[in-house]
């Protein structure tokens, strides 16, 4: 929501844990149409010290911690463990703001029926994806107006001469979250654009539903992000979208990264509301990391867990030995210190500035 060159500010906190700030609704804010800012090594270095980068990392950590199992003491004095799974009430009975976003994603998915894949011969992505994308572009303004709370659009833009509004930023991030119509591809950069879209909504106060500790974040991950991934996976399969910017076998995944973060968090050792994320250990009866190489086990677990859901999609689109087409995930599956260690490894890889101390 702010240019990457701006210096970082202190984040708001929930207890002792950082939380992405919510902008003051009474104060004007400078909105900018998102544009490419990273073109060379110096731009990368500047980005890594920017508020934009810190906001991204803070939001990921905030969502990640919410997905960690929770422990509490029941009336009988016995410890109780609560886990947060795909298909739980956070997805099936979400808060109103999340329900509206689910409805928006459902409307977006319907466009697939209006743009069936071309049946002609092709080497790469199906050209009908461009028709699908044009439908999204034509309807995006109406979709946002229908499914986002009105106060989001009443934000007063600061006077920087650009004429941009909150709607301009939100539109760019949402359109950027569904792949490239020009290249007929989809990758982790597009997934990051959807995270930016959700982060913008958070900063604009769109998720102010009354919920207990961490429940709104669980609604966002299970009620919005996982359904978004389902739409994306259908788009990839329908239009045979190419992986964008893939590192091949040397990358974690051709298309996604975030489900591995939140999915590993779902399986870590349980914590109380005042404890930090565990860096080792697993929740009681969690599947062993090594089971990701067993397709029949993955098929069952993908119904409940985001990590296994992402691995299941790899199995849908790739054939052959798992260690051969996904060696990085295969190596991770050998970690002996549990899902807490896997979660830590993935977070350090994506948000190193928050783990330097």
Image: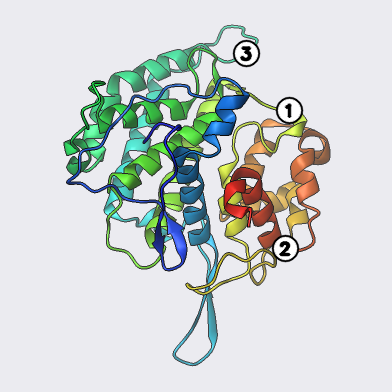
Quadrant for residue 150, please give it.
top left
Q: Which residue has dot 2 on it?
A: 338
Name the one closer to the observer, 229 or 34.
34
Mark pair 2, 1: CA separation: 26 Å
Name the one closer to the observer, 192 or 142.
192
Residue 100, position in %: x, y?
A: 29, 44
Near mark 3 (Cα within 10 A), the count class, few <14, some 14-19 or many ≥20, is few
Near mark 1 (Cα within 10 A), the count class, few <14, some 14-19 or many ≥20, is few
Q: Earlier in the sequence, mark 3 or mark 2?
A: 3
Q: Are marks 3 and 2 in contact (CB under 8 Å)?
A: no
Is any part of residue 274 visible from this angle? yes
The residue at 67%/31% (across/down) is: 317
Furthest residue to the bottom? 76
Near mark 2 (Cα within 10 A), the count class, few <14, some 14-19 or many ≥20, is many
Mark pair 3, 2: CA separation: 39 Å
SS category of the residue bearing label 1 = helix
Q: How many marks?
A: 3
Quadrant for residue 92, please give it.
bottom left
For this view, does 341 lie left or right of residue 307? Answer: right
Residue 154, position in %: x, y?
A: 16, 37
Label at residue 248: 1
For this view, does 238 lie left or right of residue 170? Answer: right
Q: Nearer the viewer, mark 3 or mark 1?
A: 1
In this picture, is 83 found above or below 231? below
Q: Quadrant of the N terminus?
A: top left
Q: Are marks 3 and 1 in contact (CB under 8 Å)?
A: no
In this picture, is 178 found above or below 16? above
The residue at 29%/49% (across/down) is: 97
Q: Which residue has dot 3 on it?
A: 124
Q: Earlier in the sequence, mark 3 or mark 1?
A: 3
Q: How is the image coloured?
A: rainbow
């Amino acid at each position: 929501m702010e240019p990457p060159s701006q210096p970082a500010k202190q984040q708001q906190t929930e207890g002792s844990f950082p939380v992405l700030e919510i902008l003051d609704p009474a104060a004007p804010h400078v909105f900018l149409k998102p544009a490419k800012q990273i073109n060379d090594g110096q731009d990368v270095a500047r980005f890594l010290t920017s508020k934009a980068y810190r906001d991204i990392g803070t939001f990921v950590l905030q969502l990640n911690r919410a997905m960690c199992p929770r422990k509490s003491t029941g009336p009988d004095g016995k410890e109780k463990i609560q886990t947060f799974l795909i298909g739980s009430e956070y997805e099936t009975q979400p808060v109103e703001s999340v329900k509206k976003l689910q409805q928006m994603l459902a409307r977006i998915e319907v466009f697939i029926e209006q743009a069936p894949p071309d049946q002609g011969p092709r080497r790469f992505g199906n050209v009908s994806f461009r028709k699908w994308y044009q439908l999204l572009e034509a309807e995006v303004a109406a979709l946002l107006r229908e499914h986002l709370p009105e106060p989001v659009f009443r934000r007063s833009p600061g006077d920087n001469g650009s004429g941009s509004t909150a709607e301009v930023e939100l539109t760019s991030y949402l359109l950027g979250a569904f792949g490239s119509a020009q290249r007929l591809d989809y990758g982790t950069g597009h997934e990051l654009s959807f995270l930016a879209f959700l982060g913008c909504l958070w900063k604009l106060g769109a998720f102010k539903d009354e919920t207990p500790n961490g429940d709104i974040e669980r609604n966002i991950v299970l009620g919005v992000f996982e359904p978004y991934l389902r739409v994306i996976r259908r788009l990839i399969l329908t239009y045979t979208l190419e992986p964008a910017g893939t590192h091949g076998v040397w990358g974690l995944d051709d298309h996604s990264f975030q489900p591995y973060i939140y999915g590993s968090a779902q399986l870590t050792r349980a914590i109380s509301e005042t404890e930090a994320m565990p860096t080792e250990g697993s929740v009681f009866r969690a599947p062993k990391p090594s089971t990701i190489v067993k397709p029949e086990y993955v098929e069952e677990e993908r119904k409940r867990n985001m990590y296994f859901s992402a691995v299941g999609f790899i199995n849908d689109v790739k054939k052959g030995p798992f260690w051969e087409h996904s060696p990085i995930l295969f190596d991770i599956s050998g970690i002996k210190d549990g899902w807490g260690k896997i979660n830590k490894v993935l977070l350090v890889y994506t948000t190193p500035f928050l783990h330097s101390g």
